[in-house]
Image (cartoon, helix red, strand yellow):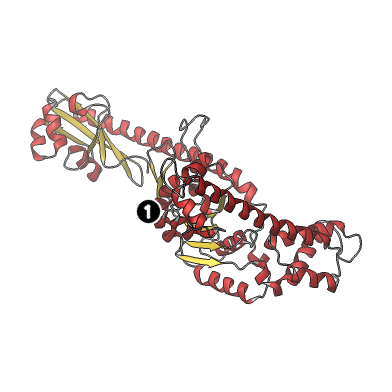
Amino acid sequence: KNFRRQVLNFPSGKGLLGGSHSIALEDTPAGEAFRSRKTVCWHEADLQHFHSDTVRQLIAEGVKSGCCVPLMLPDRVLGTLNLGSTRPSAFSTADADLLTQVAGQVAIALDNAFAYREITELTEKLEKENVYLRDEIRIETNFEEIVGESPGLKHVLQQLGIVAPTDSTVLILGETGTGKELIARALHQLSTRKDQAFVKINCAAIPTGLLESELFGHEKGAFTGAISQKVGRFELAHRGTIFLDEIGEVPLELQSKLLRVLQEQEFERLGGTRTIRVDVRLVAATNRDLMQMVEAGEFRSDLYYRLNVFPITIPPLRDRQEDIPMLVRYFAQRYATRMKKSIETIPAKTMERLAGYPWPGNIRELENLIERAVILSQGSELAVPLLDLKANLQRSTQPITTLEGAERDHILRALQDTKWVIGGASGTAARLGMKRTTLISKMKKLGISRPT
């Protein structure tokens, strides 16, 4: 499959038929040999029956005779072996027979070489995939971990069931800790791609300069430190699903390449020129307001609309209070089993406190608390450190107000110093080290307006 069937190569030619040229087979003696699967020996007069540029070039270079032998395997023709001479009638019947035998050996050698190269490439790819998949295989992919019966969660699961069988892009929205990755895994498991790879990448966890290489791979020597070729996550996810968590953190300069993959399903590795085509289903997630980022010039509008084909919003845990008791029991049993403990009861008062807590960290915060409770429990009753809830709530609310207030005061002082000039080299945005659109967005969010 790596041999170009429709070309004819002259490795030792001269002039227009230099070693780097590939010539079309159509309307040539070589093309006739390829199609008929028979050896074609020809003389200069025979070339008058062909009208391609290739034949005109042969005549111009003084070729008087030639012999074209198909490179045949039992099931296909790989190409042709072509010899030319500036002497008339240079190839006898005996020469043709000998060349046919040589061509048979060349075909076998080429087939073996192609097979070896394919095996080598597959082995290298599998080795790279295994490095990734060994980590992934440890993670449970059973969507039965989605626990709850609240109307909000039922609506999410209903949407999941509708969109999963399609190949449409899904955008999962929700606060940090609401279980966006769990929903993405469930979507994959319910899809027709469930037997293929589920590849995830947290766009916020990878330095900006390395994200392109992680997503699309790189060629050897593409940059300092690129000592070998790297297969990117999109290649690993071929025929499967790729999950881009924290999609809002993708740098603006990389968003155009991501858009191309969504539209065309193709890309080039960093430092490479070969276009790679993939068949990938994209699922993205974010806890940010992408539309607000679009308005602030921080996110491409065309990429946003490509991502926002089928949005699924996961409600925060504070809006799923009826699910909290089920989640508490689920996590208590899960960690008790892991720690070889027996947790049989959870005090009603404890459950009441847990159900009434707003859970700013959502399910992740609840899971961490229950794990800690199982560690602390010495008997059959779950001992939840309820005092931690009050401390967590104070930490999650007070600093936010203080930080917002401090940011508001800081922006106001800068605006007053610049006489409320926002743009320009000496404007407020430049002084604060941010884009003009970002500053305007923050001013709206913090309720800052120029006094009349």
The answer to whether residue 188 is seen in the rendering is yes
The answer to whether residue 231 is seen in the rendering is no
Q: Total marks drawn?
A: 1
Can you give x and y, in whole percent of width and height, for residue 217 in the image? Answer: 48, 41
Up-down relation of residue 254 to residue 103 (above or below): below
Residue located beneath label 1 in the image: 264
Q: Residue at x 18, y 24 (%)?
A: 15
- Quadrant assignment, res 25: top left
Between 376 and 194, the one nearer to me in the picture:
376
* Outermost front residue: 452
Q: Residue at x 12, y 31 (%)?
A: 43
Can you give x and y, in whole percent of width and height, for residue 202 in the image? Answer: 57, 50
Q: Residue at x 56, y 74 (%)?
A: 158
Between 416 and 309, the one nearer to me in the picture:
416
Can you give x and y, in whole percent of width and height, for residue 60 in the image? Answer: 11, 28
* Outermost bottom residue: 151
Between 452 and 392, the one nearer to me in the picture:
452
Left or right of residue 104: residue 207: right
Up-down relation of residue 73 to residue 145 (above or below): above
Up-down relation of residue 238 to residue 15 (above or below): below
What amino acid does circle 1 point to?
Glu
- SS type, badge 1: helix
Can you give x and y, in whole percent of width and height, for residue 133 in the image? Answer: 60, 48
Which image quarter is the N terminus in?
top left
Label 1: how many residues lie within 10 Å, few (<14), some (14-19) or many (20+)? few
Left or right of residue 306: residue 370: right
